Image (spheres, rainbow, N blue to C red):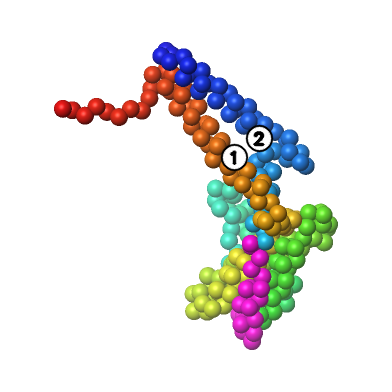
Amino acid sequence: MIHNKAAFAKGAFLMVTFLAVFVAILSPLFPGKMTGLDYADDFFNKLSKNSSDYFEQVKATVAKQKGVQLDVTATIAKPDPAVQPDPAKAQEAANKDAQAAAKALQAAGATVAIKDNVITVKGDLNAILDFATTKGRAAFDTTSADQEKPEKVADRKLVKDLWKALGALVKPLQKAGKIADAKAIDQVMKKALEPGYNFYGVDGEPVSKNIFMLLFLLSFYVVYTLWYGYSIFFMFEGIGMSMKKSKKKG
């Protein structure tokens, strides 16, 4: 039952226009046939890339590992039971990941022994981490124009395999009391391999050259949120539901 037609009509108009804009945002109407969400995501990725360059900091950490010899046994994790409930297939997947991890570490100069999904890694930690950092940098620097090249695609896969391989070494090293080694590996993973993989093919752009688009998108987000809120508010007011202060009892 509508009690206030004017308020309800105002709310309905806001809701209809809100939904029309929402449909437009989800349609491939933007450059590159992207949806509005994809366009905004790509825009913010380009802006955040330059602020995610920690490679010089990582290199300084890696340099401190000179002379450190790695000798550690680690287990490559099986897939989550929710993803792969079959124990045999889960073991098979873990074994496959262990093979990929071993291959990646061998490319970094390590000696790796494998038994099922358990790997024993020996080698120069500085050389291994320096290799991983270099590969992360190469993936990070890959532009959209080069991202489909086979050698670039292979490098990105190597970055992912190195991330999995090094990640498996952290806990065993911590348990062995080699905290500094574990921290160095963790930093290479988070500040070299992860940015390299995530920003692969993204063309970084400075905020200063995109300040107007940035302000527009942030303003639009605020206005669009209020747009929806007011449409609900006016429609509820139209059907007699509104927020009012309760009268004080005298």
Q: What residue appears at the point 21 percent right and 29 percent down from the top-left corner?
A: 248
Residue 26 rendering spot, x and y as whole percentages: 66, 34
Q: Looking at the picture, which amino acid does disc 2 mark?
A: Ile
Q: Distance between the residues labelled 1 and 2?
A: 12 Å
Q: Residue at x 59, y 70 (%)?
A: 187
Instruction: Decide which of 24, 87 is in the foreground and name it.
Output: 24
In the displayed structure, 4 sits above or below 244; it is: above
Q: Quadrant of residue 181?
A: bottom right
Which callout, 1 or 2, points to the residue nearer the camera? Answer: 1
Q: Name the quadrant of the N terminus.
A: top left
Residue 109 is situated, as x and y percent measured from the top left of the image, at 73, 77
Q: Where is residue 215 in the image (x, y as percent from the top left)?
A: 61, 47
Q: Give the range drawn in magenta.
A: 51-71
Q: Is mark 2 on a helix, strand or loop?
A: helix
In terms of depth relative to the viewer, which is nearer, 195 or 153? 195
Label 2 near label 1: C-beta < 8 Å?
no
In the rendered structure, the answer to whether residue 243 lies left or right of residue 20 reads left
| 63 in the magenta segment | yes
150 vs 188: above or below? above
Side (left or right) of 109 relative to 246: right
SS for callout 1? helix
Q: Identify the image quadrant of the C terminus.
A: top left
Quarter occupied by residue 53: bottom right
Query: What residue occupies the far left of the structure in this picture?
Result: 250
Residue 122 colored magenta? no
Write down the residue under mark 1. Answer: 220
Disc number for residue 174: none
- Can residue 39 be seen in this snapshot? yes
Q: Which mark is residue 25?
A: 2
Instruction: Tell me what residue is drawn at x 46 percent, y 19 percent.
Output: 7
Residue closest to the eye, 177 or 224: 224
